């Protein structure tokens, strides 16, 4: 898609395996979705064009395609990313407990001003008695880290659009402030 756009932003999805990153991305990006598979690196990415405050933004969102453990891809994965969606699974506590490790990696490899949005995914399962992380815990962590938080469900399509739009709007605001 070679449409005229005012901004092109890159953002990345991160978090443990099977928390729902790919499903969040495909839910958000019905526009264009592509899998680039090479022998050592698999990266999926998707584009979506969005209007924010009269500007047309092309958001390019990267997903690890199941290669979260591939440390070799780390620096190139984060390069140029202005946003990161950090995802855990509310029904699997270890995915929440690993968040500090992901945040440390982000602070190390990411842009100093990278916009981080924390998503507690699979909120549709909350009523099934298998929740292992309280919503309050996600909120507390996010406040401490000064990042934005929302529980989402890729399956039930709850807050997915909101979470991505929040991230993209924040990136847009930073770009405007920096005169990019
Ligand atoms: P990734 O490894 O983080 O990209 O996770 P995937 O998107 O591949 O999802 C892992 C598993 O969780 C799959 O079986 C999905 O169907 C399931 N899943 C993803 N998002 C949700 C959700 O919001 N709710 C529920 N109940 N299952 C989900």
Image (cartoon, rainbow, N blue to C red):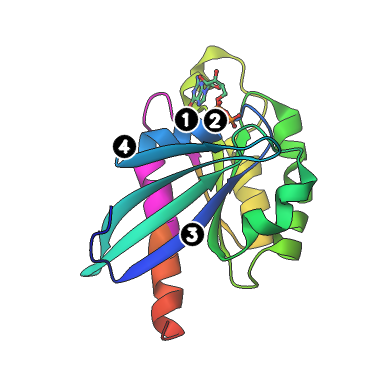
Badge 4 is on which residue?
A: 30
Furthest toward the top, the residue is: 128
Badge 3 is on which residue?
A: 10
Residue 4 image offset from top left, x and y in percent: 23, 66
Q: Is mark 2 within 8 Å of ligand 1?
A: yes
The quadrant where residue 18 appears: top right
* Label 2 neighbour load within 10 Å: few <14, some 14-19, many 20+: many
Residues 96 and 110: in front is: 110
Span of residues in magenta? 151-167
Q: Is mark 1 within 8 Å of ligand 1?
A: yes
* Label 4 neighbour load within 10 Å: few <14, some 14-19, many 20+: few
> In which quadrant is the C terminus drawn?
bottom left
Between marks 1 and 4 in the image, the one whose residue lies nearer the viewer: 4
Distance CA(mark 2)–CA(mark 1): 5 Å
Please report whichever mark, 2 or 4, sits nearer to the chain's N-terminal start: 2
Badge 2 is on which residue?
A: 20
Residue 155 image offset from top left, x and y in percent: 42, 24
Badge 1 is on which residue?
A: 23
Distance CA(mark 3)–CA(mark 2): 19 Å
Residues 2 and 93: in front is: 2
Furthest toward the left, the residue is: 54
């Amino acid at each position: 898609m070679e449409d005229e756009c005012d901004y092109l932003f890159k953002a990345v999805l991160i978090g443990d395996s099977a928390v729902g990153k790919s499903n969040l991305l495909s839910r958000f990006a019905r526009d264009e979705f592509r899998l680039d598979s090479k022998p050592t690196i698999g990266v999926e990415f998707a584009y979506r064009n969005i209007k924010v405050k009269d500007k047309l933004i092309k958001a390019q969102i990267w997903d690890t395609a199941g290669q979260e453990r591939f440390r070799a891809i780390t620096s190139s994965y984060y390069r140029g990313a202005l946003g990161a969606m950090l995802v855990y699974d509310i029904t699997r506590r270890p995915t929440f407990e690993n968040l500090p490790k992901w945040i440390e990696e982000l602070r190390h490899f990411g842009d100093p001003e990278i916009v981080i949005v924390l998503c507690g995914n699979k909120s549709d399962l909350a009523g099934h008695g298998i929740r292992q992380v309280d919503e309050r815990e996600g909120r507390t962590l996010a406040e401490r880290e000064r990042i934005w938080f929302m529980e989402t469900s890729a399956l039930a399509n709850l807050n997915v659009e909101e979470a991505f739009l929040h991230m993209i709007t924040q990136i847009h605001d930073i770009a405007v402030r920096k005169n990019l």
